[in-house]
Amino acid sequence: MNIAFFGVGNMGGPMAANLVNAGHTVRVYDLAPALVRQAVEKGAQAGNSPAETVAGAEVVISMLPSANAVKGLYLGAQNLLGSIPAEALIIDCSTIDAATSRLLATAASEQGRTVIDAPVSGGVGGAKAGTLTFICGGDEASVERARPILLTMGKNVFRAGNHGAGQTAKLCNNMLLAVHMIGTCEALQLGADNGLDPAVLSEIMQASSGRNWSLEVYNPWPGVMDGVPSSNDYQGGFAVDLMNKDLTLAMGNAMQSGTRTPMGALARSLYGLHGGQGRGQLDFASILQLIAGEPPKH
Ligand code: NAD
């Protein structure tokens, strides 16, 4: 298939590479030329403008950092939506607020275009390995149309409900992720401060009732696990700034629905503090540094 791909950052880069490896023709566009060059080295084509990128596309995928970026791309002055072939399926994989996903879906439908929201879970490791979970919002037929393409980049495709529902489910998940990452850091720090080896403690808790994804797949303690951001100075991965965006969106949802989320609110405060101490670009497992009381970076 001819696929247009917008945003080849930490997640989008490996996702686009998996589409290329599956034999699709992938044209990429990113505001950062160096990232476009990296994608081209992996077999993608470079789009010189958003309109050129979508010309002839059968599928359009976006993996952008924010709702403003998504709105700017599709609904901006250049009306990219109107340049996308009418029969193409648009899949927005960015994590954004549900209202923006619904706004995009309405604008698309008014112009005879079809869009679904399909935010992902699984991190950069999952993007590289092609094992992501896609959490979709949209009509059933469109989600089924997207399924084979999504399964090229992941191993699970869920339909949470109509437009925006994928985003709501994703935010519930990421609020829980923030809470168990902070809890995992606290437990490891408590053990280390009391003479335990964090690697041994991790092994024990992985086989005990404290077992969770942060501990098992994304251990925050440097050196305990290979190939994760904590063992690479918290570079790459899922930025603290992006986790803060997600927690802010989740708290917005909670306010609207009147849901009590005290742990989510505390997680948002702690990640806000951590990002404000000059660590917004580090991977979110670096919250260990806040727990450990390391001095701010600035
Ligand atoms: P990133 O910052 O590494 O990549 C985003 C890319 O989008 C950047 O390269 C940026 O230049 C590009 N971009 C911004 N505006 C653009 C535009 N108008 N046109 C084209 N390109 C544009 O971020 P990421 O970590 O890859 O995250 C992308 C999305 O995936 C976010 O919504 C994030 O919340 C979500 N997400 C990230 C992870 C993770 O582990 N990193 C996991 C799940 C979901």
Image: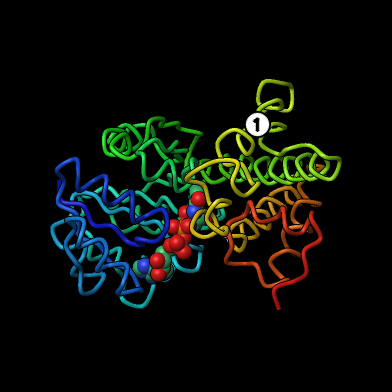
Q: Which amino acid does label 1 sit on?
A: Asn
Q: Position of residue 235 (x, y in %)?
A: 52, 60
* Residue tagged 1: 212
Task: Determine whether the residue tagged by mark 1 lies in a helix, strand or loop.
Answer: loop
Name above or below for residue 145 compared with residue 296. Answer: above
Q: Looking at the image, is 152 positioned above or below residue 252?
A: above
- Which residue is pictured at 51% across the width and 47% down the height? 228
Q: Is residue 98 visible?
A: no
Q: Is residue 169 left or right of residue 275?
A: left
Query: Residue 58: image x %, image y %?
Result: 18, 49
Q: Viewed as shown, does residue 268 lie left or right of 41? A: right
Image quadrant for the N terminus? top left
Residue 171 or residue 211, whichever sits in front: 211
Ligand 1: quadrant of the figure: bottom left
The one of 180 and 115 positioned closer to us in this rendering: 180
Q: Quick one: 215 or 63, which is closer to the camera? A: 215
- Write the residue at 84% across / 45% down: 193
Which residue occupies the extreme right position in the image? Answer: 194
Residue 87 drawn above or below residue 29? above
